[in-house]
Amino acid sequence: MSADPKQSLLQDSLPNITRELAPPTHLSLMTSDQFWAWAMDVGIKIGGALLVFYIGHHVAKWIVRAAGRGLTRAHVEATSLQFISRVIYIALLIVLLLAILQGFFGIAPTSFIAILGAAGLAIGLALKDSLSNVASGVMLVTLKPFRVGDVVQIGGSSGTVEQVSIFQTRLRGADNQTIVLPNNLITTAPIVNLTPDTRRRIELIIGIGYEDDIDAARAAIMRIMTADKRIFDTPAPDVVVYELADIAVRLGVRCFVSNADHFATKCDLNERIKKAFDQAGISIQQAQRDIRAQRRVLEAVQSSVTSAAGVTDTSQSPSPEQQSRTSSPSPDQQTPPEPR
């Protein structure tokens, strides 16, 4: 019965490193000169391999930096630059390792190619997640849904993009935490880019009472936005009526600022509008008053139901007089005492 061709190919192609490093005879049969000669030969091979790897590692980094400078002069964006530099670095390390194995241990690169060809299916199944991350990384760099420095929301995570590598993407959260996401998760999740441009809009929804003056509230808010130098004049800021709600008139405050000033400006607007409304006597209506009103109505209904149930139970239960009449017999019903 013939052997499996893939297994025989793997056995023929698999390099035998121990043959290169094994002593010519058993250690107990070796003389001291033979032992030291063998040890010197193995030490030279291993030391030379480590030295070449150390030097080649630094040369690979220098090549990556030189390629990065060239790509920067070619006006390649930071996202693509990081991805291409990482690919070049990994490719150089693979070439370096193959050269070291062939030069010091006599392992031909064709042996690894034969191994990969024979075990390609198993390797593909084992590395399917890693390969999908690589493919997703190529898609992110090619389609460019975001760039390094953009503020994004991916699934349930949000932060500033710091790096897009071959297998994963790193974000910096608002609390300075590091968020690492696999690339295949990013391409399958909704991506919201909050900073596709240099500008970003601030939108506030503020409710005022129906008895308050809309024009006075609009004028107070516009004075605040006009005095703030961080707010752009184009597009012009405005205050519009969003909704006539049940207990409030909801005003929409809209303006544009730079990406770096978005959070601070939004917080300052909230504080200044509250102080300006307090000085002008304009009330701010919130949804929590609706909740309180609903609670009062619910409590009133529950109390009325409880009182009605108490009255019903009282009417159904007999009075004390009825209980006494029922428990004690009438004089006519009482049996006279027997004569002595």
Image (cartoon, rainbow, N blue to C red):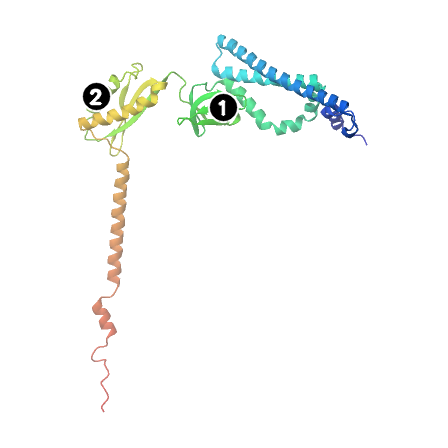
Q: Quadrant of the N terminus?
A: top right
The residue at which mark 2 appears reads as 219
Q: Amino acid at mark 1?
A: Thr
Q: Sequence order check: which comes first, mark 2 or mark 1?
A: 1
Q: Around disc 2, counting alpha carbons within 10 Å, would you say few (fewer than 14), some (14 to 19), or many (20 or more)?
A: few
**233 and 60: which is toward the camera:** 60
- At mark 1, the secondary structure is strand
Dividing the picture into quadrants, the one containing residue 97 is top right
Horizontal side of residue 273 vs 36, given as left or right: left
Residue at left 48%, top 24%?
Answer: 170
The residue at which mark 1 appears reads as 169
Instruction: Work out which residue is located at the far bottom of the displayed protein and give it.
Output: 340
x, y percent for residue 46: 67, 21
- At mark 2, the secondary structure is helix
x, y percent for residue 158: 42, 26
Is residue 14 something that shows in the picture? no
Q: CA distance from mark 2 to mark 1?
A: 46 Å
Q: Amino acid at mark 2?
A: Ala
Residue at left 73%, top 23%?
Answer: 36
**120 and 254: which is toward the camera:** 120
